[in-house]
Image: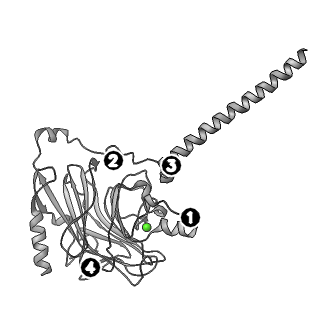
Amino acid sequence: MIWASALIFITALSSGVCDDGHEMEEFLKREYTLSKPYQDVGVSGSSHWELMGDALVSSDYVRLTPDQQSKQGAIWSRMPCHLSDWELQVHFRVHGQGKKNLNGDGLAVWYTKERMQRGPVFGNRDFFTGLGVFVDTYPNEEKLLEAQKKRYTPRTQRIFPYVLAMVGNGSISYDHDRDGRPTELGGCNAMVRNQKHETFLFIRYVRRRLTVMMDIDGQHEWRDCLDVPGVRLPQGFYFGASAVTGDLSDNHDLISMKLYQLTILRSKQEDEEQEEVLVPSVDNIDLLRPPVDEESVSSVGIFFSVLFTLLGVFLLVVVGLVLYEHWSESRRKRFY
Ligand SMILES: [Ca+2]
């Protein structure tokens, strides 16, 4: 039953029409695909995939971390990918004993220049170059503000687990304490934890448009999560996935990662415009923008800062006039 639906699902996708009306076809690329029975995965040098840290492989899944404290694990493709348009379907499971919000920290799917480097971003290095899509299961900022007895801006309030995309150019940091808000390209809430049915994440990169969709309700229907045009990702980067646990934990399991090459019919003009991208970037977005405190740029905030500036200037003028009056008075007295 599941297989039949999965088949319909994939067939439905295998030849389609883009949002912009262009025809496209897709081909499964086995060399970038991770699927059962995970033949030779983790055996040094003999498979397309390499394991790292606490990750281990069983007959049914690749477990990036077990449901235990302070674990981190990853799996990386050994070969760089030189496709210009692709689609990655990730079948995963996040499950554990912890009650709601007493679990963590989440998993990440990567397309980056760097590979096999341990670090603080869901088990992977910070200051990465490329794309990261995070399934964040622990609300760090909320818990931090709660501990500081601070209230929080409804504008940045979100429900966890939260799926978020970030593009890094090697010199920007993921803000773990703020759950990546300062560098977020887009995201959505996704109740992926302890689900009885299968959960999928879908990343499509076509004509520099990044689309992330989720299928987590067991309906075999993709739900939009984010859609960002003008994302420039170089070719020759590596696919990978990583996960981390801290004081709180979960099993982070990958069942499969399937990469499809998308063949797009491009016009001659589009082909000519297709210049080589060397450093990841997103059109009209400064990736290096400083962390924005949403409160300080709210319209109410702007209104009050203008008001106080005007009051300040008015006060200075009044004080100046009074002093000037005082000074000319005493000067007149000295003359007489
Ligand atoms: Ca988090």
Mark 4 vs 3, N-terminal side: 4
Q: Is residue 315 visible?
A: yes
- Camera sees residue 126: no
Amino acid type, residue under disc 4 in the picture: Tyr
| Residue that label 4 marks | 61
Residue labelled 2 has its Cβ within 8 Å of some atom of ligand 1? no
Q: CA–CA distance between discs 1 and 2?
A: 34 Å
Q: CA distance from mark 1 to mark 3?
A: 19 Å
Q: Nearer the viewer, residue 207 or 241?
A: 207
The first of marks 1 and 2 along the sequence is: 1
In primary-sequence order, the first of circles 3 and 2 is 2
Q: Which mark is residue 215?
A: none
Image point 40% across, 52% down: which residue? Answer: 170
Alpha-carbon span between mark 4 and mark 2 = 34 Å
Q: Which mark lies nearer to you, 4 or 2?
A: 2
Q: Amino acid at mark 1?
A: Lys
Mark 4 lies on a secondary structure that is loop
Q: Nearer the viewer, mark 1 or mark 4?
A: 1
Element marked by disc 3: helix
Question: Toward the viewer: 41 or 234?
Answer: 234
The picture places residue 1, in percent across and down from the top left corner, at: 12, 81
Mark 1 vs mark 3: which is more N-terminal? 1
Q: Are marks 4 and 2 in contact (CB under 8 Å)?
A: no
The residue depicted at 63 percent of the width and 38 percent of the height is: 311
Percent of width and height locating residue 166:
36, 56
- Residue underneath mark 1: 150
Q: Earlier in the sequence, mark 1 or mark 4?
A: 4
Write down the residue under mark 3: 300
